[in-house]
Amino acid sequence: MNDAPGRPEPEDHTARIERPGAALPPVPDPVGAAVRRRRRAEGGTDPELAARARAAAGLPPVEPDPPVRTHPTTYDDGTDDGTDDGPDVGADDAHDGSVSADAPTQRFAGAGPEGSGDPMPPVADGPTADGSDRSVPPARSRRRPARTFGRAAGLTVLGAVVPGSGLLAAGWRRSGAAVLAVFAVLVAGLLWLATAGQRTAVRAAVDPQVLLGVMVGTGVLALLWIAVVVLGYRLLRPRGLTRAQQGAGALLVLLLVAGVATPAVTAVRLAGAQRGLVDTLFAGGTSATVEEPADPVNPFGDKERVNVLLLGGDGGEGREGVRTDTVIVASIETATGETTLLSLPRNLEDLPFPEGTELAELFPDGFDAGAESESLLNAVYRNGPALYPDALGAPSDDPGADWLKLGVGEALGLPIDYYVLVNLDGFSQLVDALGGITVNVNYYVPVGGEPTLRILPDSYIAPGPDQEMDGATALAFARGRFGLSDYQRMDRQRCVLDAIVAAADPVTLLTRYQQLAATTSDIVATDIPQSVLDDFVDLAFLVKDAEIRSVVFDDTVIQPAYPDYDRIRALVQQALGAAPAAPSSAPSESAAPTTSAPTSAPSSAPTTGTPSSSSPAVADVADACAYDPAAAQAAIQAGEPPTRG
């Protein structure tokens, strides 16, 4: 170093002075060089050059006073001083000596050029080596939980239960939020369908196209759900798992996938069974008595009532053909859903037919097939089409039902719109598919037996409340009439139907629906077309909340062998509230149909007293099916009737 006065000190040559025994390697720092040039242009002193000058002169470096800091200090070599006043950087951050973009960084250099010992303040602006801007205050880093197998497993389960939550926990915020939003919409939709949207749900259940869409949509959603579960686990699992943890994780994912797939497969199978039932049962076959609605949007039009003929056909073993021992007309008011069930006895004779039809020309005095037993109401379904196959004048898939629709409608003075036939031959299968039914028994009911041949029953169903019956017992309960009247059997059949409805709770339908659907398609026939199912759904919801009444035309009102059809029609209109009281011209002093269950031993006819001649006796269906302790006790005291054994 030259100490001569007046001689200028060479500029920046101190950076190239070598210390004895050591060489200073060049430090490439393009960003630092830019900073030094800027400071020289501003007239400042470069602290780094000053430090090198002091080192070349053999002077000790000046240690700066440590500043007050609230964050860990990161020096130029990538190390920190161990101070940790804030959250740690998560385990996912790189540990290669670089500084996180979220971590605050303060750089300090040596003393000033004159060795005053004053520390240089941190650089407040300008780019750093990694391209970040020092002028922007760094955000405070957040602590991330350490990745563990237990945490990954728990979040994977949560992601399977609530799709999208696992992706959110893994840091896939947009994807997780999107999946979670879709899941929330689906849950809200299902809740609405189960509550306020029940009518919409039932409408969808009778639409084959909607059911097909449900099947496809359920399958697609299940696959996406499974993909979300698998992806969530792959993102959440930590590295370095042991083989046991890997196996446990794979097993967990398989169980979760099964938990998603099983209900989805069940839903698809149920929708498929329902679609098959609708396509089979409401196939829209050919009918001689059903006309296409003038307005497909409003098929019922301005009809005040819709009348459906309910038939119970008995075509079991040992019986030739099908005999409709149960004949009931459900007359439903379209505005309110109020329903009146009109029951005709199976042994009604001389069934009339509408004027102007070929059937009326063939049977001007009512249906007559020769023998009296073959001319009863329950024989029309089988014998009419057999005698005159082309009498309807139009093709029909079920001509017997069309014969009865025309005849029963004329007898009651009501146009019959549709029919539903339940064949008792498969009736027991339906009851078994439901897991049995529960009915009240007020008198001994025969099992088997043939009154016309005087063959005694094999056994009896004893009186008692809330009796559980399987299919075979329920069928015997509905059929038995040895020593009893047809009206008692009609009452029991209505009770059995009521018990079937009661047994068809949601849980039973869900768990046994495929069996029920298959059984129903085998034993039920109807001419209700698919085009009116939506309107029947709306009507059914009205019926559910309305009153259901029953009118039975028994032998206290009519004489089945010589019926007065004019009086029957008048009583029907009176029961429906559409006409004044019918004139008293019945063969019995009691001019009203009765509806109650029997209140005495089997030998007694069912009655509720002598009804007024001005109005028919109309009662709630449940009244006839209620348990009557007095009648049951009287039957028990009288003893069980004789049997074949």
Image (spheres, rainbow, N blue to C red):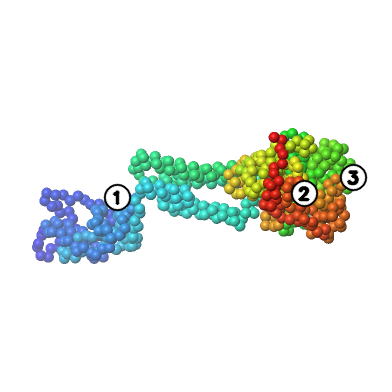
Give me the C-alpha separation between circle 2 and circle 3. 30 Å
Secondary structure beneath dot 1 equals: loop
Q: Name the one closer to the observer, 428 or 463.
A: 463
Tags 2 and 3 touching, CB below 8 Å: no
Give me the C-alpha separation between circle 3 and circle 1. 105 Å
Q: Which residue is mark 1?
A: 95
- Nearer the camera: disc 2 or disc 3: 2
Answer with mark 3 or mark 1, whichever residue precedes in sequence: 1
Q: Which label is found at residue 456? A: none
Where residue 505 sits: x, y (%)?
Answer: 61, 49
Is residue 208 toward the left or the right of residue 589 in the image?
Answer: left
- Nearer the camera: disc 3 or disc 1: 3
Answer with mark 2 or mark 1, whichever residue precedes in sequence: 1
Q: Which label is found at residue 605? A: 2
Where residue 412 sits: x, y (%)?
Answer: 82, 51
Q: Name the one closer to the observer, 456 or 315.
A: 456
Q: What residue do we see at 89% from left, 41% from top?
A: 362
Tags 3 and 1 touching, CB below 8 Å: no
Secondary structure beneath dot 3 equals: loop
Q: Which label is found at residue 365? A: 3
Is residue 74 toward the left or the right of residue 496 in the image?
Answer: left
Is residue 271 toward the left or the right of residue 175 in the image?
Answer: right
Quadrant of the drawing holding the C terminus = top right
| Residue 462 visible within the image | yes
Give the amino acid at mark 3.
Asp
Answer with mark 2 or mark 3, whichever residue precedes in sequence: 3
Occupied quadrant, residue 215: top right
Is residue 485 toward the left or the right of residue 178 in the image?
Answer: right
| Residue 498 visible within the image | no
Q: Residues within 10 Å of mark 1 (few under 14, many from 20)?
A: few
